[in-house]
Amino acid sequence: MQNKATYYAQDIEKVADKIKKLLSLSQSPNEAEALAAFSKAQEMLTRHNLSMADLVDSTPEQIEEQVINESQRQSSWKGILLNAVCQANYCFAYRLKQSAQIKQIIFGRSVNIQSARMQFDYLVQAVDRLAKQVDGDRTFKNAFKLGAAHRLHARILSGIDKQKCAGVAASENSPAISAIVMRSLYEKLEAELKAYSEKLNLKSRNQRSSCSSEDGFVAGQLAGEKVLLNQQTGEKDQRYLPI
């Protein structure tokens, strides 16, 4: 019989590979199909975390860190988007300034980090693509991206709240997840992240962002609202995770 460490390492690789294949559909010209794959990846991640919580050995999983980006200047809209994606993937994001460089770092369980990273990259590409499709100067487009990120952030957090209240519906091959189980999962993983952040002595800070084009910001919010984050994949009345 495999021990937990061996099983966990193999399971991480398996789940990460499936999520990667699902998100590869983001290159499809069919927007609905790509976003449906994105939502399915979210559901898969939650079911994985639940299965790991059910193992007999209750030893807490190891928390890891990964640098997502390193540059001299950080984009506010990307930071807003990353914070929401991390919450939906049971991770935490923070910035570390060293000399002239700013590092964007996330920590959490290995498979959760991998999922958050892939989904963050996907949404950044989606917002960039939407910005290229609108007319306007650089100031307008930057405000557009900020508006889209704010709207997507709000929708993602709203989806998390709905999960805690209603759970996740059953799919063709998977049972439903009750609201009680979902709240328990979030509480367990949030406690892990809080304990790790306390070791790092991290302090919560509100991210400030400025906007030089109200019209661009509003246009971006409207674009973020139209993204079908919970699009279905042919299975009637199927609901996925909050992204």
Image: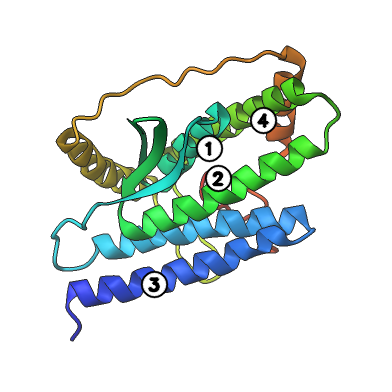
Q: Position of residue 193 (x, y in %)?
A: 25, 42
In-front residue for pair 190/24: 24
Depth check, front residue: 84 or 76: 76
Image x and y of residue 195, in percent: 18, 39
Q: Amino acid at mark 3?
A: Glu
| Labels 4 and 3 touching (C-beta < 8 A) | no
In the figure, is residue 201 to the left or right of 76? left
* Residue with the mark numbered 2: 243
State whether residue 57 appears in this view. yes
Is mark 2 in CB contact (under 8 Å) with mark 1? yes
Q: Earlier in the sequence, mark 4 or mark 1?
A: 4
How far apart marks 4 and 2 lie (CA) works out to: 18 Å
| Colour mode of the rendering | rainbow
Q: Amino acid at mark 4?
A: Lys
Lower sequence index among marks 4 and 3:
3
Seen in the picture, residue 208 relative to 157 is either above or below; the reply is above
The structure residue drawn at horizontal position 75% and vertical position 35%, both measured from the top left corner, is 131
Q: Disc 1 marks which residue?
A: 156
Residue nearest the viewer, comparing 234 with 75: 75
Q: Which residue is mark 4?
A: 145
Q: Which residue is mark 3?
A: 13
Circle nearer the viewer, 4 or 3: 4
As drawn, the label of residue 41 is none
Query: Is 169 above or below relative to 73?
Result: below
Instruction: Please tell me in which quadrant of the rendered image residue 134 appears.
Output: top right
